[in-house]
């Protein structure tokens, strides 16, 4: 066998195996592209499916290597490997061992799969930074093979079976998976490395604030971006420029912010966002900080125990329930001399701390633009508004309102207070005064005042027909009606003023009058 050219002999033996099982082969005329044969499988018969939707038959590229040795290793040029790994269709190396005999003694089929693709891509990236790194034909990579790659026997059927084993889901899926490998291998830790210099007197502070969403952008003196694969940087920067602006897309974690007067009290909860900087692992521990933000509260917590606490008292888009909870927390802070306990629950371990000595500015009456109001008083208004909603079957989560709107609802209309008293049954304290003596007025007589009230609570308009039954009297030298009972009639609830029509309101007032018709009462109508 010393005088026999093993290359043509191996190719001849390979051709025989393919012909045994009806595989079509196309010989490469010049072995410069990394493969010797294009092998095509016949159509796979399927009597259950129309022929026009049959999957494409298998095909692959195969490089045949013949040897008299049993070292189970072959050096392949990177240029050839590069072509094979980038080929969209499957590729294989077929190693035929003759061991000095005229017939093959063993045949090994090595799939150019993930392991070889990864080794090849890594080696090419390593060579890029060397002087002759682009001359891939001058560099080699060892491809090894062993018993796991050996054909069960030297037959076309074994060869065919081994090829099919590596393409179990067909050509389309194989090509999709291979393309995905080529796109992602080596980029598991990101595709680029970004080096930049900030225009800042405290870069750590500023980059942390940017990553926590405290700042929206930073000025950059210069920036360099390298492509990175397998942790190896490209020789030439992808971007190299002076000046610029750095911004980050900040993705917070869902969290729950809870305020407690005492350790074992249930607490008042708010949905919140937790911001944790990805740069924390690269900076001194004493500089680490995180941010917790809800609609009304914001905490910036530093590991050196410094806690910055602020509120957004006029936050938009809150529900009446959430606003009431916020006002309850502020009322506790306003009244209590003890620190309040704050807990933050998320995917991370629960974080808890005491909120001591909140800024005095949080309790300045100027927040409400009216010295008559403080947190406690506004909280009372929210409680009254919630009671009205509950009595009238209005979901408090659907009522959207802010502090300014809440105060305005009570300040500009006595109707809301009157309806609250009617709904709560608190009638003894109700005295309606008349600026002029109504017709038929007689002190001590039983009378009923029938009227209609309407007002806004946030995005909801509420109307109700009411009747106050009581005794006519003189109060503060003015004629009045001292209430004894309330009757509630037709009510109007919605987010659109079109729910109110004069016809329906009049109907509601008349219904109340008819209900009281059998009682000996004087009727007084007023407009609201």
Image (cartoon, rainbow, N blue to C red):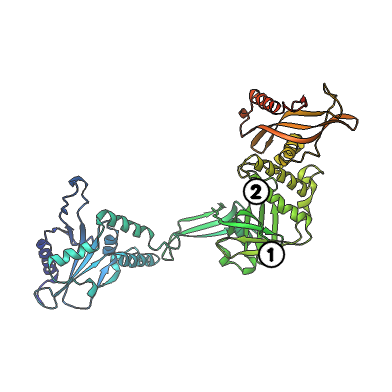
User: Alpha-carbon distance for marks 2 and 1?
Assistant: 22 Å
- In this image, 405 relative to 66: left or right? right
Q: Quadrant of residue 111?
A: bottom left
Q: Using residue 237 as the reference point, say whether residue 463 is left or right of it.
A: right
- Circle nearer the N terminus (2, 1): 1
Dots 2 and 1: beta carbons under 8 Å? Answer: no
Q: Nearer the viewer, residue 426 or 315?
A: 426
Res. 214 visible in picture? no
The quadrant of the image that shows the C terminus is top right
Mark 2: give few (<14), some (14-19) or many (20+) Cα within 10 Å: many
Label 1: state its secondary structure.
loop
Task: Give SS at disc 2.
Answer: helix
- Residue 169 position, x and y percent, is 26, 57
* Label 1: few (<14), some (14–19) or many (≥20) C-alpha neighbours in 10 Å: few
Residue in front for this viewpoint, 505 or 232: 505
Q: Position of residue 62 (x, y in %)?
A: 20, 63
Label count reads 2
Q: Which mark is residue 263?
A: 1
If the image is split into quadrants, where does the N terminus sit? bottom left
Residue at image position (65%, 24%) is: 507
368 and 116: which is toward the camera: 368
Direction from residue 509 to residue 172 in the image, left or right: left
Res 300 → quadrant: bottom right
Residue 419: x and y in percent read 72, 36
- The spot of residue 277 in percent (x, y) is 57, 60
Residue, far right: 477
Determine if residue 152 is in view: yes
- At a point 12% along the width and 63% down the height, the residue shown is 15
Residue highlighted by disc 2: 322
Is residue 50 depicted above or below 140 in this figure? above
- Farthest residue toward the top? 439
């Amino acid at each position: 066998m010393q005088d026999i050219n093993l290359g043509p002999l191996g190719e001849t033996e390979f051709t025989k195996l393919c012909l045994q099982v009806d595989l079509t082969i196309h010989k490469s005329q010049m072995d410069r592209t990394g493969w010797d044969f294009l092998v095509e499988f016949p159509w796979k018969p399927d009597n259950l499916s129309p022929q026009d939707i049959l999957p494409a038959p298998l095909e692959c590229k195969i490089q045949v290597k013949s040897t008299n040795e049993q070292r189970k290793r072959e050096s392949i040029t990177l240029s050839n490997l590069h072509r094979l790994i980038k080929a969209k269709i499957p590729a294989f190396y077929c190693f035929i061992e003759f061991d000095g005999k005229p017939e093959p003694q063993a045949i090994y089929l090595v799939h150019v799969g993930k392991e070889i693709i990864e080794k090849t891509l890594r080696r090419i990236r390593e060579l890029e930074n060397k002087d002759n790194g682009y001359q891939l034909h001058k560099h080699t990579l060892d491809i090894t093979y062993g018993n796991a790659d050996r054909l069960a026997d030297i037959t076309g059927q074994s060869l065919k079976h081994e090829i099919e084993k590596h393409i179990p889901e067909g050509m389309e899926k194989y090509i999709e998976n291979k393309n995905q490998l080529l796109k992602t291998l080596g980029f598991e830790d990101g595709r680029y490395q970004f080096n930049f210099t900030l225009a800042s007197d405290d870069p750590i502070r500023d980059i942390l604030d940017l990553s926590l969403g405290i700042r929206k952008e930073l000025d950059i003196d210069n920036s360099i971006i390298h492509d990175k694969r397998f942790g190896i940087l490209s020789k030439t920067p992808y971007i190299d420029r002076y000046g610029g602006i750095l911004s980050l897309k900040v993705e917070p974690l869902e969290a729950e912010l809870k305020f407690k007067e005492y350790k074992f009290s249930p607490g008042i909860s708010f949905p919140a966002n937790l911001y944790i900087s990805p740069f924390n692992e690269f900076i001194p521990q004493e500089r680490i900080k995180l941010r917790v933000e809800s609609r009304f509260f914001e905490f910036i917590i530093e590991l050196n125990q410094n806690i910055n606490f602020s509120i957004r008292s006029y936050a938009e888009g809150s529900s009446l329930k959430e606003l009431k909870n916020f006002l309850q927390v502020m009322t506790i802070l306003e009244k209590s001399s003890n620190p309040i306990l704050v807990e933050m629950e998320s995917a991370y371990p629960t974080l808890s701390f005491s909120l001591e000595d909140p800024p005095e500015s949080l309790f300045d009456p100027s927040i409400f633009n009216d010295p008559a109001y403080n947190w406690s008083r506004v909280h009372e208004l929210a409680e009254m508004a919630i009671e009205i909603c509950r009595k009238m079957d209005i979901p408090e989560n659907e009522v959207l309102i802010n502090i300014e709107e809440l105060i305005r609802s009570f300040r500009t209309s006595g109707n809301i207070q009157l309806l609250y008293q009617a709904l709560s049954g608190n009638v003894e304290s109700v005295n309606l005064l008349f600026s002029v003596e109504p017709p038929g007025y007689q002190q001590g007589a039983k009378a009923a005042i029938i009227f209609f009230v309407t007002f806004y609570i946030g995005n909801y308009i509420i109307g109700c027909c009411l009747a106050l039954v009581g005794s006519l009297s003189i109060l503060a030298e003015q004629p009045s009606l001292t209430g004894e009972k309330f009757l509630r009639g037709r009510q109007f609830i919605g987010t659109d003023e079109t729910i109110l029509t004069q016809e329906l309101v009049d109907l509601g007032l008349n219904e109340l009058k008819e209900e009281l018709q059998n009682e000996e009462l004087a009727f007084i109508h007023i407009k609201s």
